[in-house]
Every structure is written in C-alpha cells, then in structure tokens.
Image: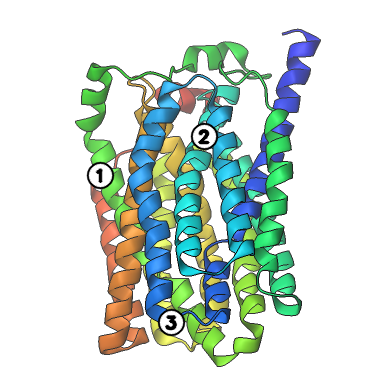
Amino acid sequence: MDRSSAEAIRSSGRGLDWLNFFVAAVQTGFGAFATVYLVKNHWPPQAIGLALTIATMSSLFSQIPAGAVLDSIQDKRRAVLLGIIGVGLAALLLCVTAARPAVYVALAMQGLASSLIGPGIAAISLALVGQAALSERIGRNARFASIGNGLAAGTMGIAGSYLPAVSVFLVAAVLAVPAILSLSFISGVREPQSVSRPAQVEKDRQDDTRISWQGMKSLLLDRRLAIFAACVVLFFAASAAMGPGVAAQVTRRWPSFATLIVAATILVPQALVAAISPWIGRRAEVSGRRPLLLVGWGLLPLQGMLYATLPGPVALVLGNPLNAVSGAIFGVTMTVVAADLTQRTGGFNLTLGALGVAIAVGASLSTFCAGVSAAMFGARAAALGLAVVGLCGLLLLWLGMPETRPAHTSESATA
C-alpha cells in the first residue's frame, strides 16, 4: 500500500470518527428533549403521545425500505448526507413553530432520515475496514457517538434551562453543518480496506450492495436471524420504558430542572459507553459475540428489579450505568452479528433495516404496555413486568442463539 493510500484511509477514519460524533449530537435534540419542549409549550399528554407515536411509526415503516435503498447504491455517503439534511431541516422546523401539524411533520421527517443514517454509517464502516476489523471499528464509532451525545446533552440541558426551549433545536440544526463536513473527509468507501491486514480483509470482503433472490431466500430462512430478531424485540420491550418512566416521575417532582435532569440521565451513561465500547468491539473478536450478548441481555432483569424496588432517584442513579453497559453491548454486537449473518448472502443493510424494525416494535410495545401497567397497577408493578420480559429475552438468547463469529476471525484473534 503506497503512502497516499494509507493517508487516505487514515483521513477517512478520522472523518468517520467525527461523523459519528456530530450525528449523535444532532440526534440528541430529539427524544426526551422533544418531550420537554412540547410540555413547555402546553401540549396535552394525548397530543404528545401522538407526536412521539408518529416519530416511532415513521422510523418503523422506513427501516426496511431504507436498507433496500442502501443495498442498491454504491456510495453510501449519499444516503447518510440525505439523512443528515433531513434531521437538520426537522430541527429547523421545530425552531420556527410549535404548531401541531409542523411538529408532526418534523418528527416524521426525523424518523425517516434516521433510518438512512444509522445503517449508512454501518455500511461505510464495513466498506472502510472490512469484516475482520468491523467489531473494533463499530466500538470506535460508539465511543465517538457517545461523546457527541453526552456533550450535546449537557449543552442542550444548560441552553434549555437558561434560554427558550427552542434553543435545543437551534443547537441541533447548527450541529448538522459539521456533520456534513465530516462526511466529506471520508473517501474510498466502495472497497473494504485495512492498513494492518489488507490480505485478510480482501479475503473477508463482501458485496453488500446487491442481494440475489437466492441470498434473500437464505437470509429469510436463516434460523439465527429469526431468533436474534426476536431477542432484539424482547430487549427493547424490556428496556425502552425503564429509564424514561422513572425520569418522567423525577421531572414531575422538580419541573424547574427538567432539562437538566434529562441531560444528566443522558450524560452519565454516555460517558460510560464511550469508555467501554472499543473494549467491547475487541472482546467480540477474542471471546465471540455470544458471551457479550448474554451479559447485555442479562443486565435487563436486574435493571427492572432496581426500578421496581428502589425509590425513583436512587433507581435512576443505579440503573443508568447498567442501562449504559447493556446498551453499549447491544450497539456494537447488533451490527457485527448482522455482518456475520450476511457475509455470504449479501443484504447487510437490509438486515440492519429488519433489525431496526425489531427495535421499533419492541420499543413501542415497551412504552405502551408499561404505560397501561403503570396506570392499572402502579409504576413498580410495571417495572417488575419489564424485568420479566427481559428475563424471557435472556432465556431465548441463551437457549436458541448460537455463536456467529466466523471461524477465520477466531483463528486470527487467537493467533
């Protein structure tokens, strides 16, 4: 490899680092901050619920089409660019008005755009480093995304406390500009490359831009993918409503500090994710995917028991680090497992889209069922129910999900 090629790869790697940082920072403006923004604009609970449902549904129904689009184009950067522009425009629209139709359109736009960004960055990562180095690259992606998420949460929390609530979305819109600039530094992403192991990576190379009917058939009939998708549904059915529900209770008790509380519940876990994600990526190559998956899923019942038995603030302090660890493990291993399962069939992005649907389904079930349970039996009973769902996910993973790490990866990791 000549000097100019090595420098281009290093430049692309740095560009990918900053892309993850700024994309995560932009996305932080939505979610919990959007809920606080709507509450401060005197939206009734049913209207807020409808707005969040629109965001979830737009993401749900666009995941698989977005994956198919990404598989059909050579340059994944175009899809990521379109996604960043969409999220930035959604933030600008929320800056302009809090009228219901505009907010509904903005949240739908953000959900659609996000379906391109996440799988697109994963596809760029795979093309840039290849299958053998993907785990470590995804861990690095998670580190920079967590740092961006945490710093943006702190900035937005302070801005939302001392400035008008709309300032959160102004910050998000401004951060879209450096995200686009970071994307421009990434080049040569059509062919997997590696500075340290070019021959191995060339051997591992997979064409994820096309999927044949035979490959599609093999993918749909892959028992491992079906089991893993079911485990993903149960993971988010157990976890999505845990922390936010307790955070909402604390926020209602101290409304003047709502944005700071939201920022704190984001900042501390993201710092932990940034610290451990690269280690998780390396460990996935050494010990395999399955042990990490079992740890990640195994933390969910413990979190549920904490929220069910301890006071709200104490549970939030103890539960957030556990949530961060399980989320970091999931964030790294989901992409790596998808790459493992599609190494010979293609359709990497389509598979990520299908798993994105599983995430949205699980999260929707979690918030809906937890809300109903909390209204009928109380918040502690709802948390206990989520713990049971988490235990079911752990048992399914333990009994049904095999190791997916390729044999040659195991040999090179132990060499």
Q: Amino acid at mark 1?
A: Ile
Disc 2 element: helix
Looking at the image, which residue is at 74% across and 71% down? 159
The quarter of the picture where the C terminus appears is: top right
116 or 212: nearer the viewer = 116
The quarter of the picture where the N terminus appears is: top right
Q: Nearer the viewer, mark 2 or mark 1?
A: 2
The tag on residue 120 is 2
- Residue 134 in the image, given as x and y percentages of width and height: 54, 31
Q: Mark 3 = which residue?
A: 44
The CA span between labels 1 and 3 is 39 Å
Disc 3 element: loop
Q: Amino acid at mark 2?
A: Gly
Q: Mark 1 = which residue?
A: 227
35 or 391: nearer the viewer = 35
Looking at the image, which residue is at 38% across and 60% down? 54
Q: Earlier in the sequence, mark 1 or mark 3?
A: 3
The CA span between labels 2 and 1 is 24 Å
Q: Amino acid at mark 3?
A: Pro
Q: Residues within 10 Å of mark 2 (few under 14, many from 20)?
A: many
105 horizontally vs 193: left or right? left
Disc 1 element: helix
337 horizontally vs 203: left or right? left
Q: Is residue 135 visible?
A: no
178 horizontally vs 411: left or right? right
- Residue 364 in the image, given as x and y percentages of width and height: 33, 62
Q: Is residue 392 above or below residue 8?
A: below
